[in-house]
């Protein structure tokens, strides 16, 4: 009888951890999207791909790295948080590295790769 009770408690604990993870993730994404939209970016993925230029964006990238590292460390205790922390850490650290190296992301053009652009036709 004790074996059945222990299995049910474990399943309940796993369900609780997954439920809390889903709630935390959805709240973080909603808050993050709002902040990105207020910053004038078209969407979350565009923000994550962009290189920080202003001091506020640089601070935000560093904050993203630190949040990702902390959530990643929490993930050592509760496994679902490990994935969330790894994603945040990756994008934040990528933004910082690109900023430190002075890289610029080229604008995505809507023209096919083989076609000359309108700027090339003028020259």
Image (cartoon, rainbow, N blue to C red):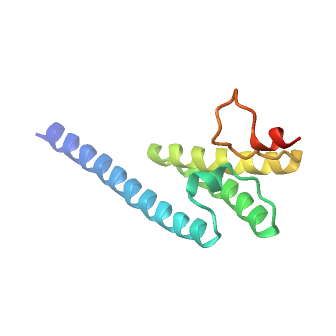
- Single out the residue that lies furthest toward the front: 122
Residue at horizontal 59 percent and vertical 44 percent from the top: 86
In the picture, the quarter occupied by the N terminus is top left
Q: How many marks?
A: 0
Q: Position of residue 97 (x, y in %)?
A: 80, 46
Q: Is residue 14 left or right of residue 36?
A: left
> Looking at the picture, does residue 71 appear above or below residue 110?
below
Indicate the quadrant containing the C terminus: top left, top right, bottom left or bottom right: top right
| 49 on left or right of 23 | right
| Residue 76 appears in the rendering | no
- Where residue 20 appears, as percent x and y from the top left, is 37, 58
Above or below, comparing residue 62 to residue 116 in the picture: below
Q: Quadrant of residue 103?
A: top right
Q: Position of residue 66 (x, y in %)?
A: 69, 57
What residue do we see at 88% from left, 44% from top? 101
**Front residue of 108 and 3:** 108
Locate residue 21: give its quadrant: bottom left
- Compared across the picture, whether 63 is left or right of 38 comes to right
The residue at the far bottom in this view is 38
In the rendered image, the vertical position of residue 80 relative to residue 64, given as above or below: above
Q: Residue furthest top?
A: 114
Task: State whether residue 3 appears in this view.
Answer: yes
The image position of residue 6, as x and y in percent, is 22, 42
Using the image as rendered, state which of residue 26 and residue 7 is in the foreground: 26
Q: In this rendering, would 122 be left or right of 118?
A: right
> Which sits in the foreground, 44 or 2?
44
């Amino acid at each position: 009888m004790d074996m059945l009770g222990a299995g049910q408690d474990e399943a309940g604990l796993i369900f609780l951890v997954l439920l809390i993870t889903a709630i935390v993730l959805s709240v973080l994404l909603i808050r993050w999207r709002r902040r990105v939209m207020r910053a004038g970016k078209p969407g979350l993925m565009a923000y994550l791909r962009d290189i920080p230029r202003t001091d506020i964006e640089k601070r935000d990238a560093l904050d993203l790295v630190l949040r990702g590292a902390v959530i990643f460390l929490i993930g050592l205790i509760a496994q679902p948080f490990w994935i969330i922390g790894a994603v945040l850490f990756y994008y934040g650290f990528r933004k910082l590295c690109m900023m430190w190296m002075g890289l610029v992301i080229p604008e995505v053009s809507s023209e096919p790769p083989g076609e000359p652009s309108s700027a090339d036709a003028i020259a």
